Amino acid sequence: MEMRGGPEEVAEMVSANVSAAVGRARATRWGRGQAQGRGQVNVPLVAELLVARGRVRRRDRWRPEQVATYQRRRLDELLAFARQRSSFYRTLYQSLHRDLTAVPLAQLPPVTKGTLMSSWDDVATAPGLRLADVEQRLAQVDEVGGDAGSAWRGRWRMAATAGSTGQRGVFVWGPAEWLQVLASYARVNDWAGVEVGVRRRLPTAIVSTTRPSHQSAVVGATLRNPLVPTLRLDATRPLDEIVAALNTFRPRLLVCYASMLGPLAEEQLAGRLRVGPERVITASEETPPAARAAALEAWGVPIVATYAATETATIASTCPLGSLHLYEDFVIVEPVDQDYQPVPDGELADRVLVTVLFSRTLPLIRYELTDTVRLATEPCACGLPFRCLAEVGGRTDDTLTLPGHAGLPVAVHPIVFHDALAALAVHGWQVEQTPTGLDIFVVDPARVLDLAAAQRRVAEALESVGVGVGVGVGVGGATGLRIEVSAVDGLRRTTLGKARLIRALAAPSPDRPS
C-alpha cells in the first residue's frame, strides 16, 4: 500500500486498514476464542504504531553519522524540555551554562534511582501528577484487577519495577512516549523476522509475570488484538503446569525470561513439551550458554536476546547475525566505572548511564542502571548503523564483599561465579551470602552433579581474586570462608518470576529453593 499525505492522513488511512483487518480476523473461525485479556482493540493506537514502526525501519538503514546527528538533536530537545518543565532538573543544572547544548553530555550529573524516587514529584513535568496517586493506582491494578491497557485519567500508562535490588521504581508515560515504548519493542520482532498478518496470525506465549503493573503486561494489554492472541504464564507456576498450557496453546512465538529458556528446552527434548515456535525471544536476564545450546537443539530456530529495562524499554536486541545492537535512536548508552567515568570499548563497565531520548513525563538523563556491560570493539557485518554490546553481565548490586587474605575486604564481581559454575551447573545456579560464608545452589533434579567439584571450582576462583578461602571450604572451619554447595530442583524466583543469581547478605531473602 502506498501512503501519501501528512502523518495525520497516513494514520487515518492505516487506522481504516487496521479496522478492516481486525474485522476480517474476527469474522473468521481462526480469529475467535484464543485472544487473552479483556477490552477492545485500540485501533487508532495500533494505526499510529504502524506509522511509527515505518519511521523506525527507515532509521535502520541510516549511516552511523546520521544516527549521531539524530541523537544530538533529540538530546538538545530533551535537555531544553527538562530544564524548562522539571523543577528537579532546573535545580540540578542551575550552575551549568545557560545553553545546555554547549555542555557535553558526560559533564552533566548522573541521576540514580534513589534520587529519582525521592524527588519524583519534582522530576515530573506534568502538573498535578504525583507519585502517591500513581502508587495508589498501581496498587489498585495489582490487588483489585482491571484493564492494564487502559490509560489512567485518559492519558497515562504506568509500570513499576520489582525492587529486587532494594529500590522500587515507578514510571509513567504520556501518549507520545508510550508510542515510542511500543515501537522499540516492535523493532525486536522486526529484527527477529517475526511475521504477522490477517492470514498469518501470531499466537504468542509469554512466560514471565502476570502482574498487571509490570511493563510487559501493560504493553500486551495495550496491543491486544485477534491477530496476536497472547497467553501469559507466570514463571513461578510449577513447570508441568506451564508445559501443559503451552502444549494446548501451541505458540508461533515464545517469549520467556532467560532463566526459563533452559527448563523449557529440556522439557521439549524430553518430549513432555511439544511446541514448534518459529522464534524464541529471551528477556530480563542473562541467557546461559548451556540454555541457548539446549534451545537450539530443541527447536532449531533463532534465539533472540533482548536487553531492556522498565525505565528505557528496549536498550538492545540481536540482529539476524546474532550481534546485540544498541537502540541508539531511542536511548544513549554510556558505559562507566564506579566513579561515573567513561570506560573504553572492549572493557567491562561497572554500570551504565542511559538517557532516554523520548522521555518527557519523567525525563531520564544520565540515569544509572547497575548493569555491567562491555561494548564491542568491532562493528557487525549486518549493516545496521548501531553499535554492539559484546556482553551484558550481572548487576553491580550483585557484587559480593568477602574477606581477603590480608583481612581486607575483597569485592567479588558476579563474573567470578559465572566462570566457575557455568560449564558445570548447566541447568542453573544461585549464590546466597550468609554471615559465615556462601550457600551455592545448583539445579540438578537427577542428582548427578559432582558437588565437591563445584565447591572446588568456586573456592579456586575466589582464591584467584584474593578471597581467603583456606581450609574452611565446605566444613565451616575456624579459618577460611565456608562454601556449601547443594543440589536443588529449580531456581528460586521473585514474585515477578525472575531468578536472581546472586544475593548479598544485606538483601532480604525469599524462600530457599527446594
Image: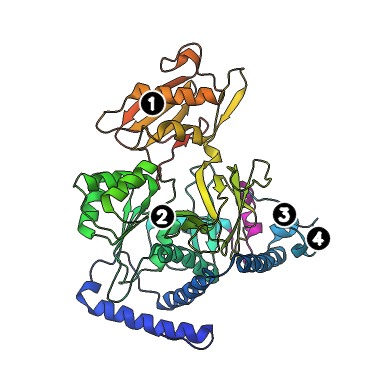
125 vs 453, nearest the viewer: 453
Q: Which residue is mark 2?
A: 142
Query: Who's the residue at 37% across and 59% down the image?
Result: 145
153 vs 49, nearest the viewer: 49
Please name which of the two marks, 4 or 1, marks the residue nearer to the observer: 1
* C-alpha span from label 4 to label 3: 11 Å
**Residues at marks 2 and 4 touching, judged by CB atoms closer than 8 Å:** no
127 vs 366, nearest the viewer: 366
Mark 1 nearby-residue class (10 Å; few <14, some 14–19, many ≥20)? many
Q: Regarding mark 2 in the picture, which secondary structure is present there?
A: helix
* C-alpha span from label 1 to label 2: 41 Å
* C-alpha span from label 2 to label 4: 44 Å
Residue 401 picture location, percent across and down = 56, 28
Q: Which residue is mark 1?
A: 454
* C-alpha span from label 4 to label 1: 56 Å
Q: Residue furthest front?
A: 381
- Magenta region includes residue 116: yes
Residue 239 picture location, percent across and down = 26, 45
Q: Earlier in the sequence, mark 2 or mark 4?
A: 4
Q: Earlier in the sequence, mark 2 or mark 3?
A: 3
**What residue type is disc 4 on?**
His
Q: Regarding mark 3 in the picture, which secondary structure is present there?
A: loop
- Magenta region includes residue 497: no
Residue 236 picture location, percent across and down = 33, 45
Query: Who's the residue at 23% across and 48% down the image?
Result: 268
Q: Which residue is mark 3?
A: 108
Mark 2 nearby-residue class (10 Å; few <14, some 14–19, many ≥20)? some
**What residue type is disc 1 on?**
Ala
Please name which of the two marks, 1 or 2, marks the residue nearer to the observer: 1
Q: Is residue 248 rendered to the left or right of residue 233?
A: left
Looking at the rendering, the stretch of residues picked out in magenta corresponds to 114-130
Q: Residue furthest top?
A: 478
